[in-house]
Image: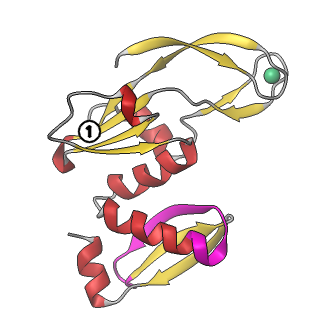
Amino acid sequence: MKERRIEMTCPHCGHVFQIKRDTLAIAGISENIEKALAKKTYFLHQCSKCHGMFEMVYPFMFYEPKKHTILFLGKKEWLSNLKDEIVICHSKPEQFLFSYQVLSKGLNLAYVLKKKKIWENKWNARIEFESYDQEHHCLWILVNQEPKAILLSKEEEIELTS
Ligand SMILES: [Zn+2]
């Protein structure tokens, strides 16, 4: 949806090229994009010249109508007329993908983002979201790619799923 030509520069070799990318995806409609977002590969690109991998950063919007939420990769100033929606801006693909994993599982994103800040301060590490294990009442996250289970109290679980 809303495909655009984007100019990119490979951070490894400086190769400048143009690439066609979707700039908007909608939950439940943009199936292929969602699959790649879930696998955390959507923003990855391999340079045709040096074959180095890198994450592409360009204005990209994911809309979840059921939660009235927009995840945006880019700056808030680039958006307008979105008064009725919750807009969450991200400067890096890894932050965007974190929000996507939480939102796509129907969890309370504001709550998990608040927790993410606490985890980042505690471990001073890159935090990724994996899943919510309802049966064992915990969240699975990756701390510098190491899996960690975060046990939840009853109150926390209620907030998480509200
Ligand atoms: Zn390159």
- Residue 8 at x, y percent in the picture: 65, 18
Give SS at disc 1.
Answer: loop
| Residue 162 position (above or below residue 91) | below
- The answer to which image quadrant residue 3 occupies is top left
- Residue 148 at x, y percent in the picture: 58, 77
* In front of the other: 118 or 47: 118
Give the residue type that dot 1 points to: Gly
| Residue 109 position (above or below residue 47) | below
- Residue 94 at x, y percent in the picture: 57, 48
* Magenta stretch, residue numbers: 120-137
Residue at 44 percent of width and 72 percent of height: 115
- Residue 132 forms part of the magenta stretch: yes
Q: Is residue 64 left or right of 103 when viewed as pictured?
A: left
Which residue, given by chain and number where applicable, does mark 1 sit on?
A: 28
Q: Which quadrant would the C terminus be assigned to in this image?
A: bottom left
Q: Is residue 118 left or right of 2 when viewed as pictured?
A: right
Residue at 20 percent of width and 28 percent of height: 81
- Residue 107 forms part of the magenta stretch: no
Numbered circles on residues, count:
1
Residue 27 visible within the image: no
- The answer to which image quadrant residue 19 occupies is top right
Furthest toward the left, the residue is 84
